[in-house]
Amino acid sequence: MSIRVMLVDDQVLLRTGFRMVLAAQPDMEVVAEAGDGVEALEVLRSTAVDVVLMDVRMPKLDGVETTRRICSQPDAPKVLILTTFDLDEYAFSGLKAGASGFMLKDVPPAELLGAIRSVHSGDAVVAPSTTRRLLDRFSPMLPSSGREPEHKELGRLTDREREVMMLVAQGLSNGEIAARLVLSEATVKTHVGRILTKLGLRDRVQVVVLAYETGLVRAGGGATG
């Protein structure tokens, strides 16, 4: 079955370009388009979509709020944020709103296609190094919530799960974590799955966000303890 993709961007030419790239893939189909968040939410009420490519800066309703509303629904499609080269603060807000990752608008077609497939399969959707750069830049913008580094949610984790979480938050892939801890990749994937379940998170991107918010990992990629 083809991956059903929705394009949400106020630039018609950009949507056209993405549509042409996706239409050439045997496993993808553009099933809907929208020029702003309000239109996107309306279309999603009657159209089955697997992955939404979401611009952040749009009229009427921006991509962050649109993402938040989409991801709050049961069985919501995965959202992949499209941002500018400068990585503005909206990208991080989009991740906090529930997006599964982000890509630059000028990303090479092969990388965009790979990201869509990864999102659809539930795997990591941004390169660890890219995630790390984004969080290093924007973690100081996180609102202060008075949380202590030892947040109660983290107390649900075993020592090994906590160790894996810190490495995920530092931007390491499952393979890199496996090598660091002398484990199999399958075992690391199991630990990541348990972390998601225990903390009520959708994917590893939200693991990173929580680790920064709670102070488990600080900007710069270092663990706090």
Image (spheres, rainbow, N blue to C red):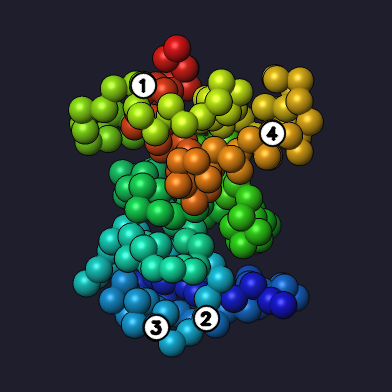
Q: What type is the residue that disc 2 sits on?
A: Ala
Q: Earlier in the sequence, mark 4 or mark 2?
A: 2
Name the residue located 58 percent from the left edge and 50 percent from the top edge.
125
Which labelled disc corresponds to residue 150?
1
Residue type at mark 4?
Val
- Residue 186, percent across and down? 76, 38
Q: Which residue is drawn at 59% across and 40% down?
A: 194
Vertical arrangement, residue 194 with respect to residue 30, above or below: above
Callout 4: SS: helix
The residue where tag 2 is placed is 48
Q: Is mark 1 on a helix, strand or loop?
A: loop
Mark 4: few, some, or many residues within 10 Å (few <14, many ≥20)?
many
**How far apart are the alpha carbons under marks 3 and 4?**
37 Å
For residue 189, which numbered disc appears in the image? Answer: none
Q: Position of residue 145 (x, y in %)?
A: 21, 33
Q: Which of 161 and 97 is in front in this view?
A: 161
Do labels 1 and 3 touch, CB within 8 Å?
no
User: What whole-number distance in Å separates the C-alpha atoms at marks 2 and 3?
Assistant: 8 Å
Q: How crowded is mark 2: few (under 14 residues within 10 Å), some or many (20 or more)?
A: some
According to the picture, the residue beneath numbered tag 3 turns out to be 45
From the top left corner, tell me how far across and down residue 133 is, in percent: 46, 32
Position of 70 relative to 64 (above/below): below
Q: For marks 4 and 2, give the CA distance.
A: 32 Å
Under tag 2, what secondary structure? loop
Q: Which of marks 2 and 1 is in front?
A: 1
Q: Which amino acid does label 1 sit on?
A: Glu
Q: Name the residue under label 4.
A: 188
Tell me which label, 2 or 1, sits earlier in the chain: 2
